[in-house]
Image: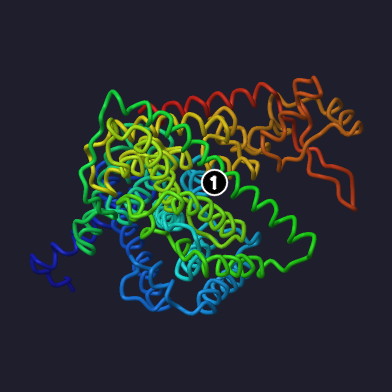
Amino acid sequence: MAEPQKSPIGQGVDDALTACRGGWHVIRTRGPSQVQFWFIALLVGIAASFAAIGFRFGIETFQAWLYQTDDVAYLRSNAARLDWWWVLLIPMAGGLAVGVILNRFTDDGRVRSVADVIEGAALYDGRVEARKGLMSTLASFVTLSTGGSTGREGPVVHLAAIISTYVSRLIRADGITGRDLMGCAVAAAVSASFNAPIAGALFALEVVLRHFAVHAFAPIVIASVAGTVINRSVYGDVTEFLIPNQNVLAFYVELPAFLILGLLCGLVAVVLMRAIFWADTMGTALQTRWRIPRYLRPMIAGTLLGALAIYYPHIIGVGYETTSDALTGRLVMHEAIVFVFIKIIAVAITMAGRMGGGVFSPSLMVGAMTGLAFGMVATGIFPDVSGEGTLYALAGMGAVTAAVLGAPISTTLIVFELTGDWQTGIAVMVSVSLSSALASKLVHRSFFLTQLERRGVHLAAGPQAYLLGTFRVASVMRAKDHPKAADPQTCAALILEGTYISQDLMLDQAMPILEATGSSFIPVVIPATDEGPPELRGALFQVDVLRAFNRALAATAAEEHS
C-alpha cells in the first residue's frame, strides 16, 4: 500500500530537518565553514554574555542582602554603618564556604581563573577544565558576594571559557577553531561585564590568544558587540565611572610628569604582584608547618579581611566606590596613599587564601589612588602649568592595570570605555607604555604569565619554550616494529645502564635526558614493576623530536599570521 503524500508544508519541514541534520553532521566531521563558524561564534558570545551578566547580577543581589544596602555602588559607605561583628562575620563565613567547595570539588584547592584560560588556549586547543572551573566560579561568586577584595573579571573569563570548551567538544573543533571560540567567549564576557566592546575584543586577542590574527578578529568582534548589546539592554548605555570634569592636558609642559607617573605605576604594579605571590608562598608554608586543613585556609583569609574591613571598609568587594572617589578627586592625599597599601594587603590576603576572583578591579583601584596621590604632588609643585589632578588618577589607573595584566593596548582602551573620557589619550598612553615596559622586566611579563611560570608552565618566553610540552613521547617515538627502529641490542644495553625514559613523559621532559646521553636516540619503556623489569616499547630519536618541534612552530606561525 502506498504511503500518503505529505502536504507541501510537511514536506518542507522534513526537508529542513534533513538539511539541519546533514549540516550538523558536516560540522561534527569536517568542522564548520567560515559562515557557520561566525554564527557559532555569535551564539557562544551571547551565551557567555548572559553568563557574565548573571554572575554580576547575582553578586550584586547577594551583596545588597548581606550588607543591607539598596545600591552596591555605595557598598563601602553602607558597610561602614554596620556593626563591627557583622563586617567581620560575613567574609569569615564566605571563606569557610569557599574552603568547603574547593576542598570537595578540586584536587589542589586552587581557584581556576584567567591564567588557566591562557594555558588552555596555548596548550590544550582552547579547552579548560569544566567541572573544576564551575566550582571555581561558584567559589569566586561566594568570595565576591561576601566582601573578598578581588574582581569579577577572572571568574567571568573562565566561565566564558567553559562555555566555549563545551561547544568545541560538541563540534569536535580543532586547535585553531577551539582557540578562536574561546576568544569569542572571553571577548563577549568582558564586554558584557564592563560595557567595553573594543577592549573586550582586544583583551581576548592580546591576553588570551596572544596574537592578532585576521581570521580570529572578525568573529571575536562579533561576539564582543553581542556582549555590549546585552549589557546595555540590561544596565543602559552608561559607563562604570562618571567623571564630571573635563580633563585638559598641558601637552608639552605636563607630559614629562606622566612619564614619571608611568615608571612609578610600574613599580607599584610589581609590588602588588609580588605581594600576592609572596603571601601565597607564605600561606602555603604556614599551612604545611601548622598542618592547617585545606578547607580552613580561605576562612582564615576571610577572618583577616573582615578584621581589616572593620577599620577600612574600602577594601570590601571590587572597590568601585573608592575608585570613583579617586577619579573625581574626593580623596585627600594621605587617604590615597594609605588606601594603596591597604588595598594591596587586602588583595594579597584574598588571593593567598585561595578565595578566588580577579586582579583587574583591584588594579584599577590601586592605580587610580596612586595616580591621584602623584597628581596632587605634581599639581602642587607646578600649579600654573598643570591640569586637573584627576587626570593623573585616570592615567595611573590605566598604567597599573596594564602592567599587571600585561595588556597595554586593551587596558588603554578599557580605561577610556569605563570612564567615557577620550580627550586625555596621550597622557594615559604615555603612562601605560612606560609602566608596562618596566613591570615586564621585573616579572614574567604579566601577573597571569608569572602565575603559570610558578606552576612550571613556561608560556612567557613564547612558543619555542612550551611547544615541546604539548607532545607525549609515545606520539613521536619509533615503535619496535618501525622500519627504521633502533637496534634492539643497543636498546637493551642502554636499559641495563639505566638510560631510558618512560613513554608517558612529555618531550620537554625527555629532551634534557636525551641530550645528556650524547646519543641520537634513547630507549622508551614501560616502567618496571614488582613483576618484572622495564619493557621496551621503542626509541625516541632526536631527529624526530626536532621534526615535530619544527612542524609545531610552523603551525603556530601560520595561525598567528593567517
Q: Residue at x 48, y 58 (%)?
A: 150
Pinpoint residue 20: horizontal percent, then vertical percent: 25, 57
The answer to which image quadrant residue 349 occupies is: bottom right
**The one of 469 and 139 positioned closer to us in this rendering:** 139
Residue type (three-letter) at the residue carrying disc 1: Leu
Is residue 361 among what the camera can see?
A: yes
Left or right, 184 with reference to 487: left
Reading the image, the residue beneath label 1 is: 272
Which part of the image, by quadrant, shows the C terminus?
A: top left
Q: Residue at x 56, y 60 (%)?
A: 350
Q: Residue at x 78, y 28 (%)?
A: 522
Left or right, 263 with reference to 26: right
Is residue 223 among what the camera can see?
A: no
Pinpoint residue 181: horizontal percent, then vertical percent: 37, 47
Structural crowding at the residue carrying mark 1, measured as other residues with C-alpha within 10 Å and reported as few (<14), some (14–19) or many (≥20): many
Dot 1 lies on which element?
helix
Pinpoint residue 69: horizontal percent, then vertical percent: 35, 76
Pinpoint residue 424: horizontal percent, then vertical percent: 26, 36
